[in-house]
Image (cartoon, rainbow, N blue to C red):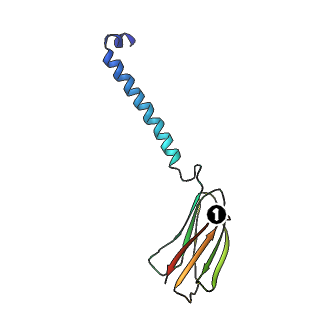
Amino acid sequence: MIKLFKNNQSALIVLIIVSLFLLSAVTLSFVSKKYTDPDYKKDWWVLSFENPKDKSLNFSIENHSTKNSFHYEISDGQNKLSEKDLIIENGGTKKIEVSADATNKKITISVTNGENKKEIYKNL
């Protein structure tokens, strides 16, 4: 096989370029898959309403952090309507169904994990 490439230098160059391209493509594929994983060396969490357009106060917390202890409070600006402590494992999502009577039109949901605090609001 080497004798074949000694006679044809351009075929050898093409073979080397194709081999390097395939090696690069495979390497980049593995690196890309690792860094697009939401739990690989990441520390973030998300707070969102299940349906932001309706009057429901149901919300969810998606955890991709090293902390798994959360505390939420629901208030209408004047009164605390509800509060609870939650455990959400890394990579997990917890959906919270809320059945609170609000006397005010603006509802605030505050969630903390001990270090960070996030809030979402809904006008009813």
Left or right of 115? Residue 31 is left
Left or right of 121? Residue 22 is left
Badge 1 amino acid: Ile
Q: Residue at x 46, y 40 (%)?
A: 29
| Residue count near mark 1 (Cα–Cα under 10 Å), binned few <14, some 14–19, many ≥20 | some
Q: Residue at x 39, y 23 (%)?
A: 16
In depth, the one of 93 and 118 nearer the eye is 118
Question: Splitting the image into 4 quarters, where does residue 117 fall?
Answer: bottom right
Per the image, the residue denoted by label 1 is: 88
Q: How far across and down, in percent of the image, does residue 11 sit?
A: 32, 19
- Give the vertical position of 20 relative to 116 (above or below): above
Q: How far across and down, in percent of the image, does residue 51 sit?
A: 47, 74
- Give the vertical position of 30 relative to 107 (above or below): above
In depth, the one of 103 and 115 nearer the eye is 115
Q: Residue at x 66, y 63 (%)?
A: 115
Q: Residue at x 56, y 78 (%)?
A: 108
Q: How far across and down, in percent of the image, does residue 48 sit?
A: 52, 69
Residue that protrudes farthest toward the bottom in the picture: 103
**Element assignment for label 1:** loop
